[in-house]
Image (tube, coloured by chain):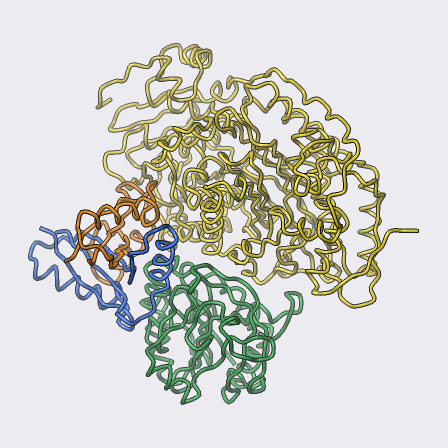
Chain colours: A yellow, B green, C blue, D orange
Amino acid sequence: MSKSVIEITPEVAASHGLKADEFQRVVEILGRNPNLVELGIFGAMWSEHCSYKSSKKWLKRLPTSAPWVICGPGENAGVIDIGDGQAVVFKMESHNHPSFIEPYQGAATGVGGIMRDVFTMGARPIANLNALRFGEPAHPKTRMLVAGVVHGIGGYGNCVGVPTIGGETTFHKSYNGNILVNAMTVGLARADRIFYSAAAGIGNPVVYVGSKTGRDGIHGAVMASAEFDDKSEEKRPTVQVGDPFTEKLLIEACLELMESDAIIAIQDMGAAGLTSSSFEMASKGGVGIELDLDLVPCREARMTAYEIMLSESQERMLMILKPGREDVARQVFEKWELDFAVIGRVTDTGRMILKKDGQVAADLPVAPLAEKAPMYDRPVQMTPKPAPLGDVPAAGDIADCLLKLLASPDLSKKDWVWRQYDHMVMADTVIRPGGDASMVRVHGTRKALAVTTDCTPRYCFADPEEGGAQAVAETWRNITATGAKPLAITDCMNFGNPERPEIMGQFAGCIEGMRKACLALDYPVVSGNVSLYNETNGQGVQPTPSIGGVGLIDDWAKAVQIAPKADGEVLVLIGETKGHLGQSLYLRELLGREDGPPPPVDLSAERRNGDFVRAEILAGRVKACHDVSDGGIAVAVAEMCLAAGRGAEAGLPG
Amino acid sequence: MDAAVIVFPGSNCDRDIKVALAQSMGKEPHMVWHRDADFPKVDLIVLPGGFSYGDYLRCGAMAAHSPAMREVVARAGKGTRVLAICNGFQIATEAGLLPGALMRNAHLQYVCSDVNLRIETNQTEFMAKYRPGQVVRIPVGHADGNYQADEATLDRLEGEGLVALRYCDPNGTISSAANPNGAARNIAGVYNDERNVLGLMPHPERLSDAALGGTDGRLMIDSLVEALS
Amino acid sequence: MKAKVHVALKSGVLDPQGKAINHALHTLGFPAVRDVRQGKLIELEIDEKDPAKARAAIEEMCRKLLANPVMETYRIELVE
Amino acid sequence: MKAKVHVALKSGVLDPQGKAINHALHTLGFPAVRDVRQGKLIELEIDEKDPAKARAAIEEMCRKLLANPVMETYRIELVE
């Protein structure tokens, strides 16, 4: 090793996110101390972000199968069958910490990263959504963070040419020091042409494509799992910069090469860049990989093996090609003016061997790194059920209350946000943003996909189990409200520090609620992401299990939106109204209270009412449909009228 | 009738205009890669919307130098019709096909929404199916649609009836409230002197299918296809 | 040889970015600021020792690509 | 007093625009060009005679608005 060999001590290990016992496990696996490159690799692969070590135990409880599921969690994205030989590939992922430090680039690279997870499986991205949580509007940083994040999402998504058609934006003080930016991408693929990441074929070439490697984002994976404190402002230089123009070229080049049979396996370089992609491809394929880092296209001079392996430069993919197909592939990437380099081979040693300047920079067994990754069964302290609300004084004249509610940050119209997103490119958007679920046609067919993201964090904070069930049920209801049949979900689990039992209690509770709703609604989880340590100075964000739902309608012309079409149409309320005010926006926005239990979720009623409403829509008897959620009936009717520019008369029965 | 769509690295709306053209023409236009200068002889060339070269440096600055663009300028000089939509309009001004320049929107934000447009003249192949002064609803989607030129050029464009359409409110009044990007005199599209090249910021291909909420954009495409068939 | 190319909007041409920055600076408490104009500064390296040849090449780059003659002017500064 | 503020990306930070311009210049027949970086040059007028006070005020404008500390550096040039 050219530079002085750094003595690997527990402190150096800790700076890579490895606790003392975890470092001990590394030494046992290797039978010696790791060098700095090896330590960096273990630190990244065993970070919370890549290994799910605190959450895997609970994630296993989520239902992941249904007749229409082609591929569930474990690959780059989930895959469902929509008939006629077509499949829909989708996933959601978080970029919370980078977006707090540099909102534009943090959000932009979040959009770029989730799109790569989808087209790496052979799907053309056809819709993007974003679930955003900000601090209070009055907080000094909020305005700048909102502007930066929205410009970043638009700046990247619009340039790549994928319509940004849905999502949500809410505000609460618990996000003042730790905003949430969850990006979701939905793609369309041939069901018989899905690409996976398991490396195979001893001797096959390992190929690097896309942008050159720089020093951006080093420690990105580790940072994502590092708690924020006020000193985190100094971690500035680690933020990555996105190049949406190169991403557009990468999409076209990859999809063009995927028309041929040259690719055996492919994966995008996400968190921990070349490290996680090469290791995951090797461990899934049960093979070894040998890389010569001198062949990696670099943007900066004299990059070390450590920097090359942990760099999180954007817009890069790793592929295993069939032997002899390198030139065919090179031509495609050169047409699209992208870097292309064969940087190694698949081997049968079951080991990852990295060479740099003619020397072995790292020599690690692949299997133990994946199989012996630490798995924690962290202590759990379940959230106590909240006390009943009791009587609530009227907050004044109902009309005045309604106006205040509609003007509150969470319920105010978000046109200012999605007008900055190109939501019409690809000319298939049949339901534009602003309704319950947005809808894009399956190009060239009458079919269409309804997509939405939902979560009510205040419910999850008060009662994680009810909140988790409600988040899943609301996506199911929003998709149903368009006439589409909900098929499957992805999730982005944003929680505080898992080393605190009450946070693990929130996580476990939300998972239980999600499980019940998925089972009751035949609505499996096919992909997802976990983002922990969303906490500042020991104060966690409200538990936010963002749910991304996808549904299908066979004929887009049958779909309905929230806007009534003509005077004289009759407003019909489906479902029982129990006047529940616990954790309501009425309580919070008008009375400044955040107490009481969230509304209980009756999953059988949810399913019964939903199936009835969907049938009525498909029979053509419904002109408009809107789900009743935040703010209750009055807000729901008001939103329908605003969407149509009409009035409505509604009264209490009897 | 035959048409060609030039595809630049970063073009996003090439497929959208191909679908809209095929709807009217009954056959597909040629999709021409920006490096190919010798594409078939056609009656209509379309420069599509998108972010050619990422809109880096200036929108359309780099695309204007593509081999295909040199051929487009040559053929336009000999009368071939050119429809330059959004990024295509920016490329056309950078390539000298049309006067003026498209600057950053006055409010500095990207804007994607339907806008009302007043058809200034229907005495061209591009607009034959509209009535003069007709108000149509067509979407825009851009961050740099703020058309500017020196006063003399603006006066000449208006004087010689070379302004194709302007942003207006639903009943056709030209107002600053109806202007989505600060464009001089609410100009949304202009012709070259010979009226065989039209550059406009709105996307007709985004509202030429009832599924998407309207068909006002289709009339422009049908006008062209009919006139050139 | 290093070079800097300053591309600025011709005076009189609308500068949306400059106007927005001017306004933002006022709201941030800098009333004494006016006439804010934003241009581009392109730095590059050129393998050419002879300054005259370097300047001529960069001149041509500006005419062809780096500046839009309709609304921009450019100034070249050679470094070293 | 006139002033110029040059805002540039920190070295090592990816410059997608510079990369694309560099590539375009090569295709336009300028192979000798490398390391193209695009930054901003903000020109402004400030009603302040004392250069030290003017520089201090502009320094603060850069910290608060004109430069993004995460990714950019700035250099102030006062012009009499």
Q: Residue at x 57, y 52 (%)?
A: A127
Relative image position of residue B77 (x, y in whole percent): 35, 83
Residue A536 visible in the shown view: yes
Q: Going by the image, does A239 lie left or right of A426? A: left
Q: Nearer the viewer, residue A223 or B45?
A: A223
Give coordinates of residue D79: x percent, y percent. 16, 57
Residue depicted at 28% across the width and 63% down the height = C35
How many numbered marks does the figure carry? Answer: 0
| Residue A204, image x, y percentages | 42, 35
Q: Quadrant of residue B171?
A: bottom right
Q: Is residue B15 left or right of residue A578?
A: left
Q: Quadrant of the N terminus of chain A?
A: top left
Q: Residue furthest right?
A: A654
Q: Residue B201, relative to residue D26: is it above or below? A: below
Q: Is residue A496 above or below residue A88?
A: above
Any part of residue D26 in sight:
no
A39, D5: nearer the viewer: D5
Image coordinates of residue A576 in percent, x first then y, are: 85, 43
- Say left or right for B213 vs A628: left
| The quarter of the displayed image where residue A493 is located | top right
Left or right of residue A13: residue A469? right
At 33% from the left and 33% from the top, the residue drawn is A308
